[in-house]
Amino acid sequence: MRWWKGAGSADGRFRRQIAIGDACRVDARGASKLAFGEMDYGARPADPGRRQFTLYASHAGEVAQNLADRGAGQFTDTLMRRLNENTLDQSVHGLVGIARSLQADFQLLRTKGLAWQFPQFVIDRDWSGSTIFGDRWTDPEFAGPGAPRLDQIGWKELGALLHGRDTPAHTYDGYRWAFDITGCVLPAHRGLPPGGLMAIIHDLDARQGRQRNMPLTLPFIRYLAACSPELPWAEAADAWVDDTRERLGSSPIPAPPQPDPEPAGLHVRLTEDTESDGAHWVRIWLYREGVFEAVCESDRPLAMSEVQDRLARQLLADQSGGATRIEFHVPYGLLEEEFECWRLSIGRRGKEIELGCHYEVLVRCPGERDGVAGEHWRRKWQWFKAHGGTDPKAVRELRDGDVGDALGVFLQATEPPVCVLAEVSQQRLLDTLDAVLDAGVPIAVWPRRGHAVLDRGGLVATLAGANGMDVGRLPALLRTLRIPLPGAPADGVQRSSFPLALMWDDPERVPERRPLS
């Protein structure tokens, strides 16, 4: 486009130019095979007599909708239907009207829930010689983003408000909500922009949303204030939003949504008895509404079969409190115990029920989170809380070739990864778990007994799914995978198909550490 606009191209021909650019999707798996080389087209200084009209499938930062069944984008498909209604001469001279009609088409598609993008057209020196950009040319009814950006007062006050603050929990949730509340499509990249809170604010201020009187930054700060446990800071942040909103003329910012209540869970701690072979002291807590309540404590070391009986009685007792998750706090030597495959007589009329089919079963190893590994553990969990589980940096895939003496040092070097998907053999499993614990990685998934999960494309493909990887979904997802399909043989399909272990070690969910022995 720069070359066509420059003086000297095509000996002065093509005085009026129309460029139609459809957004394209690059599959991440094939991106490494593409070679976008750099090329200098030798553009000369711009020729003021040349006029360009550019029609885009969406605004900058928006994801354009693809129609795989038609081999085209929705923008291209809709545009071609408009162009086919006119002759070439009519299309060239009436393209402004066609562009407005195209925007009206997308307005109707959005109303029906069939589209989300906002086509945009730009005229650099229109046919009468004036310079017009983007939305000021379009009808107000179909206008795109025009929200005011932060002024100098807002930036100065915000700099003081955020000075010295780390990225807090729920930052990514607030980032997503800002786009949702302003009717703007979330950027195509997953995760937060790098660089901390001020970098995120700059990113939001540069994008803006669909509501012309609501800058993206305002709902973002409102969300952080609602989630902050520091009441003075939250009040100051809310006051900044209110003052800035009034000064910029923004519409009121609604209250952010409340997070879903955390379901109740049982925490079962097994402490190895030093005087008995294979026996463990047992203590069970009910975690509900942010409080641990001790509900069971053994008065002697128990064999593993006795632990199962004690847990079954607890699950049937009234004190279980509707628990949906069972977290086993175990010593290192029990990480390979298949707790999710325990069969307990807790069904109707004492029927045996496989634990992992009815509960989210997690294993934990908080006793190994000591020394500097404990610092890495807490640091990584804070990153997970702030950035969420969809950021590509959150997950590290490991296979046998990745396991070595330096793996633990590599995994702990930065806040991410917070989750390891270890599709490793039995020979490499303990080395992998050692590296995970040394690095403080709080979440890990690995095959039980070293079996590879290949019948659905491998461990990574199974857990990623069609919508990409989301670490936060792992507990519920693994429970779903452990449920046998209808017609499966009764000899424990899950043990052969998806014998997966999930370590989910939340440093903020650790009951008191009083020894039972």
Image: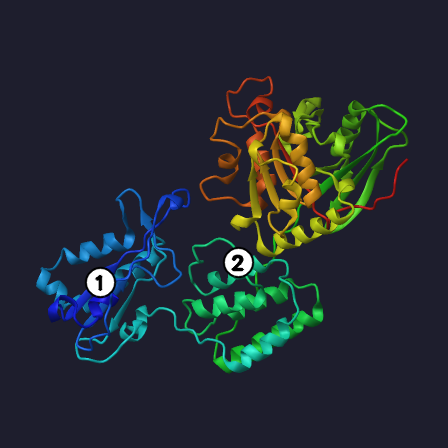
Residue 164 visible in rendering:
yes
Amino acid type at circle 1 is Ala
Asked which quadrant contains residue 30, the reply is: top left
Which residue is pictured at 41% across the width and 42% down the height?
A: 29
In this rendering, the answer to whether 360 lies above or below 203 is above
Q: Is residue 164 left or right of residue 108?
A: right
Tell me residue 421's x, y (percent).
Answer: 58, 38
Tell me residue 248's x, y (percent).
Answer: 48, 80
Closer to the camera in the image, 174 or 272: 272
Q: Secondary structure at mark 2?
A: loop
Crowdedness near tag 2: few (<14), some (14–19) or many (≥20) residues, C-alpha within 10 Å: many
Residue 324 visible in rendering:
no
Asked which quadrant contains residue 254, the reply is: bottom right
In this rendering, the answer to whether 263 lies above or below 314 is below
Tell me residue 141's x, y (percent).
Answer: 31, 71
Q: Which residue is mark 2?
A: 192
Amino acid type at circle 2 is Leu
Closer to the camera in the image, 7 or 396: 7
In this rendering, the answer to whether 502 lies above or below 258 is above
Q: Secondary structure at mark 1?
A: strand
Which residue is pictured at 81% across the width and 25% down the height?
A: 306
Give the quarter of the figure containing the C terminus: top right
Q: Which residue is mark 1?
A: 19
Give the quarter of the figure containing the N terminus: bottom left
Which residue is pictured at 16% across the width and 58% down the height?
A: 83
Crowdedness near tag 1: few (<14), some (14–19) or many (≥20) residues, C-alpha within 10 Å: few
Q: CA distance from mark 2 to mark 1?
A: 32 Å
Closer to the camera in the image, 429 or 473: 429
